[in-house]
């Protein structure tokens, strides 16, 4: 690359790092709690109710085991992952197209990755890495490796299943006007072999740890077939959020209009990456689609076929709209506190640390479960199950929690009053009745009740 390209590349990365450090970071409580419990010997699925597949959690637990657990460590892990995606977006774009498109793609990725709530670790971001590597190997027709990395994506999050749409179409040979399609047998076998090479070790590991039945119950039966249809789980966007989320993908209009079927495959991969936003709409669910959106942006801006006057007008509109959207996002999130570690959380962490010893059992009700890892305490119930209706209403869950509370007798219960609506309004009746009957208010810390045995 020329010197100017290196300067441009370093400039984009420097701006991105500045934004990552200074924009609001989302520290999802589960990204601290679940690996923390795993480090302390709790087995996923057997002792922790997790509806997601395990690869990211295992890697995060290893990272915490080496470097300690905390908000800073979570930030570092997340930012390293984003930098890996930076490198992949640039390298794949350069390999499959050219340096100019790669530089633009990297810029677009840094821009939209943040906009779609990417400054925080969730399964979609991690899954997007391996799904994008699978995309590269599909384009290079190396289907064994494509199968390996798609399966790694699937055991990072189940919504990777949607990428089987573009992968499956790539395994079909089209003979054009005759409408005669033939499955590429050898390539299909290679892809299936790649999946088997990952699935067999996974099953063996689950069997060795004795958690295969629990994995099937939570990650397969519950996570795939029950959770997406659960009452309260379906969350569709309003018109404003729908427009905002669709706007960045309008770049595909000039791309497909002028280049046609040549880049239709890129659109299909993007579409597959977006499907994870259903049924529970959140911006961060778009993360697996952002690398493909970035590549499309690079292709449009360097392609001579997109230099017509109508497209130039469209691009002016698109760029201005993008700047306005990002400016609003920037002003809203710049220098904001870490989400889920605001003052009320940090104050409660200080209080709990002052009133417990490491390893003490406490119980958190209707409040953020990052309290456990941030204070070094342990949940008083085993297995730990999220306090959401679609988990708590499963037969036997609350009864087991009440039994555990009776046996462990936690010295502290932290309780936030139930809300009038939303997720925080759900009351697990059996657990709540036991706590109400056996615990009393000691004091309030930033609006959170601290309960002690009567």
Image (cartoon, rainbow, N blue to C red):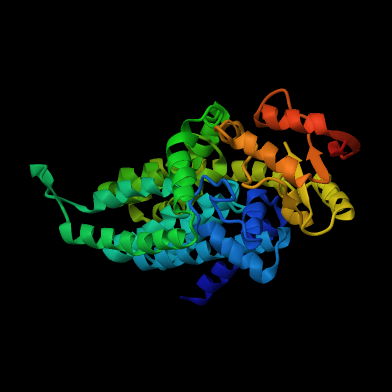
The quarter of the picture where residue 302 lies is bottom left
Question: At which x and y percent is residue 143?
Answer: 28, 62
Vertical placement of 167 versus 94: above or below?
A: above
Vertical placement of 393 versus 34: above or below?
A: above
The quarter of the picture where residue 21 lies is bottom right
Q: Residue furthest left?
A: 178
Quarter of the picture holding the C terminus:
top right
Q: Nearer the viewer, residue 339 or 377?
A: 377
- Residue shown at the point (58%, 69%) measured from the top left: 10
Q: Residue furthest right?
A: 443
Vertical placement of 276 versus 433: above or below?
A: below
- Residue shown at the point (70%, 62%) measured from the top left: 69
Please give left or right for residue 83 compared with residue 350 in the image: left
User: Quick check: can you spot residue 260?
Assistant: yes
Question: At which x and y percent is residue 199?
Answer: 37, 59
Total numbered labels: 0
User: Quick check: can you spot residue 249?
Assistant: no
Q: Nearer the viewer, residue 300 or 209?
A: 209
Please give left or right for residue 298 compared with residue 411 in the image: left
Vertical placement of 334 versus 399: above or below?
A: below
Please give left or right for residue 425 compared with residue 196 in the image: right
Question: At which x and y percent is residue 364?
Answer: 75, 42
Question: At which x and y percent is residue 359?
Answer: 77, 58
């Amino acid at each position: 690359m020329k010197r100017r390209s290196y300067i441009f590349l370093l400039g984009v990365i420097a701006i991105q790092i500045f934004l990552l450090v200074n924009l609001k970071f989302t520290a999802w409580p589960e990204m601290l709690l679940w690996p923390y419990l795993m480090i302390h010997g709790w087995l996923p699925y057997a002792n922790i109710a997790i509806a997601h597949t395990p690869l990211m959690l295992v890697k995060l637990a290893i990272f915490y085991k080496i470097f300690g657990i905390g908000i800073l460590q979570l930030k570092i892990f997340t930012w390293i992952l984003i930098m890996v995606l930076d490198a992949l977006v640039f390298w794949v774009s350069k390999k499959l197209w050219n340096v100019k498109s790669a530089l633009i793609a990297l810029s677009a990725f840094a821009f939209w990755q943040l906009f779609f709530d990417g400054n925080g670790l969730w399964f979609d971001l991690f899954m997007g890495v391996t799904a994008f590597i699978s995309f590269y190997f599909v384009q290079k027709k190396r289907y064994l490796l494509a199968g390996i990395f798609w399966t790694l994506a699937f055991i990072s999050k189940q919504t990777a299943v949607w990428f089987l749409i573009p992968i499956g179409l790539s395994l079909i040979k089209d003979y054009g006007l005759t409408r005669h399609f033939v499955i590429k047998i050898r390539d299909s076998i290679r892809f299936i072999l790649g999946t088997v090479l990952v699935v067999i070790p996974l099953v063996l590991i689950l069997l060795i740890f004795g958690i295969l039945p629990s994995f099937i119950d939570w990650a397969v039966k519950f996570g795939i077939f029950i959770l997406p249809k659960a009452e309260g789980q379906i969350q569709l966007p309003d018109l404003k959020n729908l427009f905002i989320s669709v706007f960045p993908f309008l770049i595909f209009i000039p791309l497909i209009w002028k280049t046609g079927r040549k880049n239709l495959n890129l659109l299909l991969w993007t579409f597959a990456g977006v499907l994870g936003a259903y049924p529970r709409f959140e911006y961060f669910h778009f993360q697996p689609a952002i690398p493909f959106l970035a590549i499309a942006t690079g292709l449009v801006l360097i392609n001579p076929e997109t230099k017509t006057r109508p497209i130039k007008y469209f691009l002016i509109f698109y760029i201005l709209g993008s700047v306005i959207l990002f400016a609003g996002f920037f002003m809203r999130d710049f220098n904001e506190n870490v989400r889920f570690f605001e003052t009320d959380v940090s104050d409660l962490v200080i209080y709990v640390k002052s009133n417990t010893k490491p390893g003490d059992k406490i119980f958190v009700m209707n409040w953020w479960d990052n309290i456990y890892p941030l204070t070094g305490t342990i949940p008083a119930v085993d297995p730990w199950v999220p306090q959401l209706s679609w988990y708590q209403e499963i037969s036997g869950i609350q009864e087991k929690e009440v039994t555990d509370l009776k046996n462990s007798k936690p010295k502290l219960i932290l309780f936030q009053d139930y809300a009038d609506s939303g997720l925080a309004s759900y009351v697990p009746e059996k657990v709540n009745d036991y706590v109400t009957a056996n615990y009393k208010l000691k004091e309030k810390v930033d609006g959170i009740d601290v309960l002690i045995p009567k």
